């Protein structure tokens, strides 16, 4: 039996460098203030629980790399196809379960790289890949409820290079310029925010979100929050 209030399932874990607990804790109060009953799981085992998944309106995932079994990924994909919303940011959603083709098929995009500074400026830390860049809202994004009213904005953090398919609706992009120390020979544009319809479900992926400070950027915060509400089954069914 479904619960009266909308239910959000926060699934977190994987590589600790993306601070899965701290970053998801940024948004749990927002979900609760919007009437969600929030469950938190430190394991993807929950994806293989069909009863729990059927009672979940929104999944917020922050699990960078790590592994998920075929049964878990199948349970996740089936739930989304049946109407459960799915959202996440950065590596917690766009670089999860690298060995699972079925997961990649579900979300429609996969982190490939975050280009680094010129070699002389690298210090062997995560900041080596922090580059100033602009997130451009697309014409579609200017009309979409997740990104409408947001202007192009700049960040100084990891700039994700994403491999993706044509089924995603790209709401924002970022362009990797040509630099002497990188091997590509023309600018490459990657999706930075995308929406995806999968069966009866909705998916919203935001690539900025390396740490709490990025997620607290007002533009990123707004996109993630709106993305949660848009992806949720309560929105999909309306």
Image (spheres, rainbow, N blue to C red):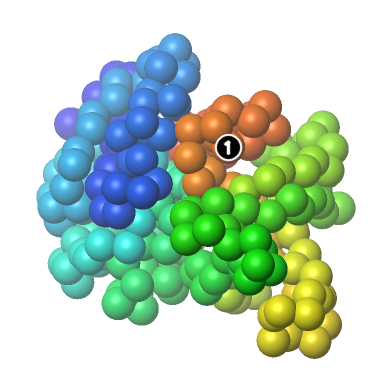
Q: Position of residue 192 (x, y in %)?
A: 66, 56
- The quarter of the picture where residue 58 lies is top left
Q: How many marks?
A: 1
**Which quadrant does the C terminus fall into?**
top right
The reply to whether residue 61 is in sight is no
Residue occupying the point 79% across, 50% down: 134
Q: Is residue 17 visible?
A: yes
Residue 10 against residue 183 in the figure, above or below = above
Dot 1, crowdedness within 10 Å: few (<14), some or many (≥20)?
some
**Residue beneath the point at 21% across and 64% down:** 68
Q: Residue furthest top?
A: 33
In the image: residue 5, left or right of residue 107: left
The percent position of residue 122, horizontal first and vertical second, equals: 58, 62
Q: Nearer the viewer, residue 164 or 22?
A: 22
The residue sitting at 86% across, 53% down in the picture is 139
What residue appears at the point 79 percent right and 41 percent down from the top-left corner?
Answer: 153
Left or right, 203 with respect to 195, comes to: left
Q: List x then y, in percent, for residue 131.
A: 69, 55
Q: Is residue 196 above or below residue 147?
A: below
Residue linked to disc 1: 214
Circle 1 — which element?
helix
Is 8 or 215 nearer to us in this picture?
215
């Amino acid at each position: 039996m479904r619960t009266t209030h909308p239910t959000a399932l926060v699934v977190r874990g994987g590589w600790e460098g993306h601070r899965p607990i701290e970053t998801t804790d940024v948004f749990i109060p927002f979900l609760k203030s919007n009437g969600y009953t929030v469950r938190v799981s430190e394991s993807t085992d929950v994806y293989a629980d069909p009863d729990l998944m059927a009672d979940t309106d929104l999944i917020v995932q922050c699990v960078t790399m790590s592994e998920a079994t075929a049964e878990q990924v199948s349970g996740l994909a089936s739930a989304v196809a049946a109407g459960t919303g799915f959202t996440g940011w950065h590596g917690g959603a766009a670089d999860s379960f690298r060995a699972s083709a079925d997961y990649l098929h579900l979300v429609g995009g996969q982190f490939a790289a975050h280009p680094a500074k010129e070699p002389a400026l690298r210090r062997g830390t995560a900041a080596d890949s922090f580059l100033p860049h602009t997130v451009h809202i697309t014409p579609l994004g200017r009309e979409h409820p997740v990104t409408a009213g947001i202007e192009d904005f700049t960040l100084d953090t990891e700039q994700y290079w994403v491999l993706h398919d044509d089924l995603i609706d790209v709401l924002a992009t970022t362009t990797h310029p040509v630099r002497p120390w990188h091997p590509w020979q023309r600018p490459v544009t990657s999706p930075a925010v995308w929406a995806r319809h999968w069966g009866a479900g909705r998916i919203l992926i935001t690539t900025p979100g390396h740490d709490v400070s990025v997620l607290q950027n007002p533009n990123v915060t707004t996109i993630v929050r709106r993305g949660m509400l848009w992806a949720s089954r309560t929105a999909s069914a309306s």
